[in-house]
Amino acid sequence: MLSDVVYEGARAITGPYLGSLGASAVLVGFVTGFGEAVALVLRLVSGPVSDRTRRYWALSIAGYTITLVAVPLLALTQMLWQASVLVVAERFGKAVRSPAKDTMLAQAGTGTGRGRAFAVHEAMDQSGALLGPLLVAAMIAVSGYRLGFAVLAVPGVLALATLLWLRRAVPRPVDYEHAATVAAVDPASPSSALPRRFWLYTVFTAVSMSGFATFGVLSYHLQVRHVLSESLIPVVYAAAMGAAALAALGSGHLYDRIGLRGLVIALPLTAAVPLLSFSTQVVAVWLGAVVWGAAMGIHESTLRAAVADMVPAARRGTGYGIFTAAYGLAWLAGSTIIGALYGRSLVSIVLFVAVTQVVALALFLPLLIRERAE
């Protein structure tokens, strides 16, 4: 939660801040999309490393440290390239820590239900993501972007202190998982191969994410079209994060009860985003933020929880690395395309997003059919 105060507070103003340094809509879409791709694609490396070394805490602490240092440094940037590098560095920290962190979360959620565990985790994340933008908005109202970034050093220090305390309190999260479950799977054996179902699920998620705009592009629209004041844009992001927290809890509960069917709602939510968020009507923009946040909450919680149930326990780090790499590449491509289409027309964005969600649904149906058959 504390960490999300830091990096979600920064992400709430990344688009407008890059725009103030001279970035275009395409460049904002590329930088923010590239950052997300780095956060996800590099898990192809950090995932297998976490599986081989089992040094989950070390990787988690290193990744959080990179992120929590990079964000406050944005207050010192003077040039667009400097800010862009730090935006990507913040996401690099996420790439380092996430497979290890998700593996520990899957272990800890063995007894509670993984849908619930990932949902509660996401709700805590989004609680921080609600507070961070509000804090940044207040600082921008007082003194502009630089104070908004600088103040995030305080929750950053508190987050690292909490993480180190937790490392001492729970040194072996694997103890939450039944020993027989872990011991039964040898990473080198054929039984630990990633199943076909996982690969199809990964493709489905990637296609769906290719139609999901980053908030950097959405906030850029709010700034350049003067839909809202700069100090209100982080508040819009805070509203989105509140919606994400509630959606994560709801979808996690549904997943534990009815399985993959509970994820279908993410597709129409994603399709509705451009109709609302690229409007110049204030009410539509606020509603769009809620819809965008709800879709994000499902993507970042329950969609990840399903991966843990599809791959062998000893290959979870690798599975998460592959899954999120595909997710990130698709998000990079999609956000860049949406940024480019922004200069053409809203209709072209709406059509692009709608097509991606229809294709995603076609890929998802075989997964639902197989789940029912089982």
Image (spheres, rainbow, N blue to C red):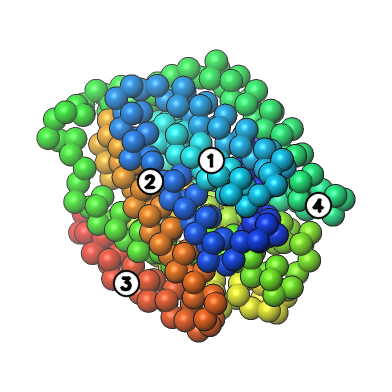
Q: How many labels does the image show?
A: 4
Judge the density around disc 2: few (<14), some (14-19), many (≥20) Cα neighbours within 10 Å: many
Give the label, 2 or 1, closer to the camera: 1
Work out how far the residue at label 3 is from the one at label 1, CA to CA, in angstroms. Answer: 33 Å
Residue at label 1? 89
Q: What residue type is labelled 4?
A: Gly
Work out how far the residue at label 4 is from the one at label 3, CA to CA, in angstroms. Answer: 43 Å
Residue at (33, 22) in percent of width and height: 53
Q: What residue type is labelled 2?
A: Val
Judge the density around disc 1: few (<14), some (14-19), many (≥20) Cα neighbours within 10 Å: many
Q: Which of 329 and 73 is in front in this view?
A: 73
Residue at label 2? 41
Residue at label 3? 359
> Counting residues from the N terminus, which is met first, the one under dot 2 or under dot 1?
2
Residue at (26, 50) in percent of width and height: 198
Of helix, strand and loop, which one carries label 3? Answer: helix
> Counting residues from the N terminus, which is met first, the one under dot 3 or under dot 1?
1
Work out how far the residue at label 2 is from the one at label 1, CA to CA, in angstroms. Answer: 14 Å
Of helix, strand and loop, which one carries label 4? Answer: loop
The correct choice, above or below, for 226 with respect to 9 in the image is below
> Counting residues from the N terminus, which is met first, the one under dot 4 or under dot 1?
1
The correct choice, above or below, for 219 with respect to 225 in the image is above
Residue 302 location in percent, x, y?
A: 44, 51
